Image (cartoon, helix red, strand yellow):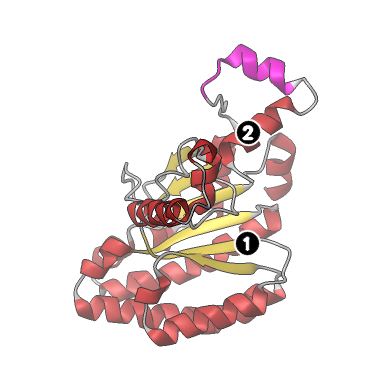
Amino acid sequence: MQEKLRRTGEIPRHIAIIMDGNGRWAKQRSMPRIAGHSEGVESVRDTVEACGQLGVEYLTLYAFSTENWKRPKEEVSLLMRLLLKALKDETDRLHTNNVRLQTIGEISALPVEVQNELLEDIQKTKDNTGLTLILALSYSGRWDLTRAIKRLVEDAKANKLPEDQISEQLVASYLSTGDIPDPDLLIRTSGEFRISNFLLWQLAYSEIYITPKFWPAFRRDELYAAIRDYQQRERRFGMVSEQIKSNGSKGGTLNRLIKSVTGP
């Protein structure tokens, strides 16, 4: 299947996933919600492995939003313990498979032991050259934009930022994803049709794939289905089909256009 996907079309450079439905998956089985989160770790493992094998460059997983802090304290505590365990258990596997770990979000809000483990794991994998796995933790798109605006204002006050230099590219560079290309493909599980405050700026031209499967039931076959669907779409970036076809035959003009829209 991986070889077929490579032959039939372009593999997305960056895939982002909203991993939704852990609690509902567990409820259907009369199990505690944390059981759904635990099974979701298996989905993460299989998805990361498949993306690495396919040659996907970046995979961003919406693991814990700023809104998730509003959940019952007991569930949040269990989620933090599960995150810590997953990091301890999986980092050696990531390192062996040449995966580089990064994170975005208000990491200072996480428990100190989780912060320390994250920093240690990021340091351990920083020189790996394969898939970059980005965990969005205590993250929201509005937090990201607000933080970027504050940084812009600070630099403007310090005369580091002339007004005539402010552009979309400059704003994007102040986001937590400043050195990461925008997602080509967003996958959302559980059948919900919303982006839930995730990468609000970065998803402007991402293709969106919705699957009714809950995240704990998501495995590489569903990932392949999403990529097949992506390969059948025409990404126009505001142009018309005739322009896409014309630019596509002009020595990389289309690729340069895509990079100008989606980032580095």
Three-letter amino acid code at disc 2?
Ile
Which mark identifies residue 46? Answer: none
Residue corresponding to mark 2? 258
Residue 122 in view in this figure: yes
Residue corresponding to mark 1? 132
The residue lying furthest to the top in this view is 242
Q: Is residue 242 above or below residue 44?
A: above
Horizontal relation, residue 61 to residue 12: left or right: left
Along the viewing direction, whichever of 16 and 176 lies nearer the viewer: 176
The question of residue 246 being in magenta is answered with: yes
Q: Main secondary structure of the magenta part?
A: helix
Residue 186 in the image: x percent, y percent? 47, 45
Horizontal relation, residue 252 to residue 107: left or right: right
The span shown in magenta is 238-248
Residue 78 in the image: x percent, y percent? 31, 81
Horizontal relation, residue 29 to residue 152: left or right: left
Along the viewing direction, whichever of 76 and 105 lies nearer the viewer: 105
Tag 2 secondary structure: helix
Residue 170 in the image: x percent, y percent? 54, 44
Along the viewing direction, whichever of 153 and 8 lies nearer the viewer: 153
